[in-house]
Image (spheres, rainbow, N blue to C red):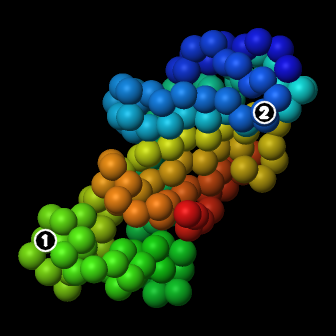
């Protein structure tokens, strides 16, 4: 694979991997401070495609807002991905940790708004050659990711956003 330069992560060394990236201490445009930034590609990825893909990240604020719209819309369905992710954090971990994660006295007061307010952008992945998963924004409860669970907003090549729960 050719040597390329990311406008966010600097020089890239894919080596024998299809994934390269770096931690972005300052994030992108003030979002995702300390987030991991990954670029997925293969031997066909070139600088021009990388540059085009990174243009989508020039307005991270809009992307994050779109992710939160998708998460909030799903919270109306108790069986949705966002609701199950929220449920995991309220039901599967100890109450003391829930209170610490959400800055509350009891897990019973974690409303949808409190839940959404505590989602933090911790990872960004772009896949310039993909059709199904062109961009993914990974969110966790708290910047230090006390659980290994992620709520992920995924964009396809047509701009459609889907929500995934990953660990």
Residue 36 to residue 84: above or below: above
Residue 19 to residue 11: above or below: below
Estimate the x, y position of residue 124 in percent, counting from the top left. 55, 40
Q: What residue does disc 2 label?
A: 17
Residue 124 to residue 22: above or below: below
Residue 164 in the figure: left or right of residue 117 = right
Residue 106 in the figure: left or right of residue 124 = left
Q: Residue at x 55, y 63 (%)?
A: 167
The residue closer to the viewer here, 64 or 119, is: 119
Q: Residue at x 66, y 55 (%)?
A: 160
The answer to whether one can see residue 109 in this image is no
Q: What residue does disc 1 label?
A: 104
Residue 160 in the figure: left or right of residue 67 = right
Residue 8 to residue 123: above or below: above
The residue closer to the viewer here, 2 or 137, is: 2
**Label at residue 11:** none
Element under disc 2: loop
Estimate the x, y position of residue 16 in percent, counting from the top left. 82, 29
Work out how far the residue at label 2 is from the one at label 1, CA to CA, in angstroms: 43 Å
Q: Residue at x 58, y 64 (%)?
A: 166
Q: Within 10 Å of the Cα at label 1, are there few (<14), some (14-19), or many (20+) other Cα atoms?
A: some
Quarter of the image for the N terminus: give it.
top right
Estimate the x, y position of residue 147 in percent, counting from the top left. 40, 63
Number of numbered discs overlaid on the protein picture:
2
Q: Could you say which quadrant of the image residue 37 lies in?
A: top right
Residue lying furthest right in this view?
A: 44
The residue closer to the viewer here, 121 or 72, is: 121
Element under disc 1: loop
> Is the C-beta separation of discs 2 and 1 under 8 Å?
no
The residue closer to the viewer here, 32 or 69, is: 32
Estimate the x, y position of residue 73 in percent, counting from the top left. 46, 71
């Amino acid at each position: 694979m050719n040597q390329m330069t990311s406008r966010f992560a600097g020089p890239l060394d894919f080596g024998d991997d299809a994934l390269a990236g770096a931690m972005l201490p300052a994030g992108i445009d003030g979002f995702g401070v300390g987030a991991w930034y990954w670029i997925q590609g293969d031997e066909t990825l070139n600088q021009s495609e990388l540059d085009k893909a990174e243009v989508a990240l020039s307005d991270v604020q809009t992307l994050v807002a779109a992710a939160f719209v998708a998460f909030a819309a799903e919270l109306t369905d108790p069986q949705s991905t966002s609701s199950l992710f929220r449920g995991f954090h309220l039901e599967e971990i100890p109450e003391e940790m829930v209170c610490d994660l959400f800055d509350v006295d009891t897990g019973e007061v974690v409303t949808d708004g409190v839940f959404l307010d505590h989602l933090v952008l911790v990872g960004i992945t772009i896949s310039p050659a993909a059709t199904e998963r062109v961009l993914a924004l990974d969110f966790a409860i708290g910047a230090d990711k006390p659980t290994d669970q992620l709520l992920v907003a995924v964009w396809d090549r047509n701009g459609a956003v889907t929500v995934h729960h990953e660990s």
